[in-house]
Amino acid sequence: MTKDIIKELEGAQTPLYYYDLPLLRETLSVAKSAADRFGYHIHYAIKANNNPRILREVSAKGFGADCVSGLEIERSIAEGFNPSDIVFAGVGKTDREILIGLENQIMSFNVESVQELEVIGELANKHQLKGRIALRINPNVDAKTHHYITTGLDENKFGIMKHELSKCIEIINANEYLELIGLHFHVGSQITDLNVFKSLCLKVNEWNEWFYERGHDVPVLNLGGGLGINYSEPDEEAIVNFSNFFYLFHEFLTVRSHQQIHFELGRSIIANCGTLVSRVLYIKEGIKKNFAILDAGMTELLRPALYQAYHKVELLSDKHTEESDTKEEVKYDVVGPICESSDCFGKDVLLPRLKRGDLIAVRSAGAYGEVMSSRYNLRQELEYFFKE
Ligand code: LLP
């Protein structure tokens, strides 16, 4: 952040979400050219950040959209995504949401159970609208990430289990309004060990072959998302290494020449473009601990409270640079105002000595930040600052 921007933020109402749009554009360009190199296609995972301003940037770069609700589909279309480039996942699609997908003739329903497939079939039939289907297969691959965001194991609720796939094929074959266009996989989020994706590729190869042997030469393989970011050093790796990621799939996936490879990336696109900016309300010097109490809390950024996630906390105010105590560093538990002990952004965070009114940045908050905010404690509406 430049000094000018920090000056502007000092006069702004906090807490606010700061979005760095030039960084987003650069990230989108880097991701796109890395994918283009292998002819891969990216659907941006709307769930990571559905802010309309962000969505317009993403759609303008020609990305597709990965949605998990009817409202996400409608918002994506309103913000410039092409319905024929929208995929719709989720274990609990309602009839109303399925209809939104059918009416908009989206690219595919990523189907997660036999019963869901039957309902899509009935609705497609009733309304005489084609339902394009990608079967989400649970590949039983361990994403080696936080257990709350692991999705590809047998014990997870996601995807169709192996023994039900033949039944799915029967249902699709028997309904002229259903068309099998692909296979879908997604094993988890914030995956930093690329070997996980190698294991995924090997499973995908097996399933691709399994369907082919049964006469289904599916045109699309959707590998999901999950590419993790470096939360510890958001400046050093502001843009993740998309080339290494895609190269791995190029190396380990066995695909037939006409098959398209799709990805659903959320966090790796938007996380580093967002910062939660907050103000120090009070400093409380305890016997064992010093507390820096902020005007933002778990209501604005839930990840630390929910997943014990690390976000880098920094002092933004440059008032300090003019003062003599600049170099003195103190350990703080950086906490929010909410009535929960889990409302803590970091314990024993080493920061320059803080004062009431200082501006604090909680970094890498662009993904699963604003979208997971709540009005618990009847909190005020979020504010925004877009760096143009
Ligand atoms: N595709 C599917 C089917 C998904 O379920 C997800 C994320 C993605 C793609 C995008 O994954 P990404 O590239 O963003 O890792 N709230 C959690 C993350 C939940 C992820 C849910 N699914 C967090 O704050 O870490």
Image (spheres, grey):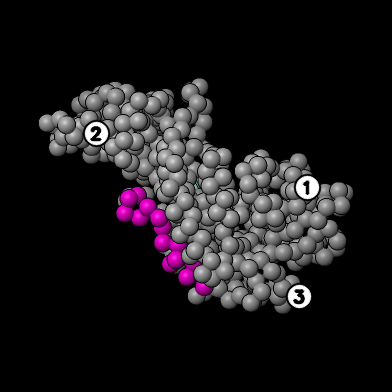
Q: Amino acid at mark 2?
A: Asp
Q: Tell me, for residue 318, which label it has, or none.
A: 2
Q: Amino acid at mark 1?
A: Glu
Residue 6 as seen in the image, left or right of residue 205: left
In this figure, which residue is indicated by the disc labeled 3?
215
Secondary structure at numbered mark 1: helix
- Residue at the spot 54% in from the left edge and 50% down from the top edge: 58
Residues at badges 3 and 1 in contact (C-beta under 8 Å)? Answer: no
- Magenta run includes residue 242: yes
**Measured from the top left, where is residue 297 in percent x and y?**
41, 31
Q: Quadrant of residue 279?
A: top left
- Residue at the spot 50% in from the left edge and 22% down from the top edge: 378
N-term mark: 2 or 3: 3
- Residue at the spot 71% in from the left edge and 53% down from the top edge: 106
N-term mark: 3 or 1: 1
Q: Tell me, for residue 103, which label it has, or none.
A: 1
Give neighbour class at mark 3: few <14, some 14-19, many 20+ (Cα, 10 Å): few
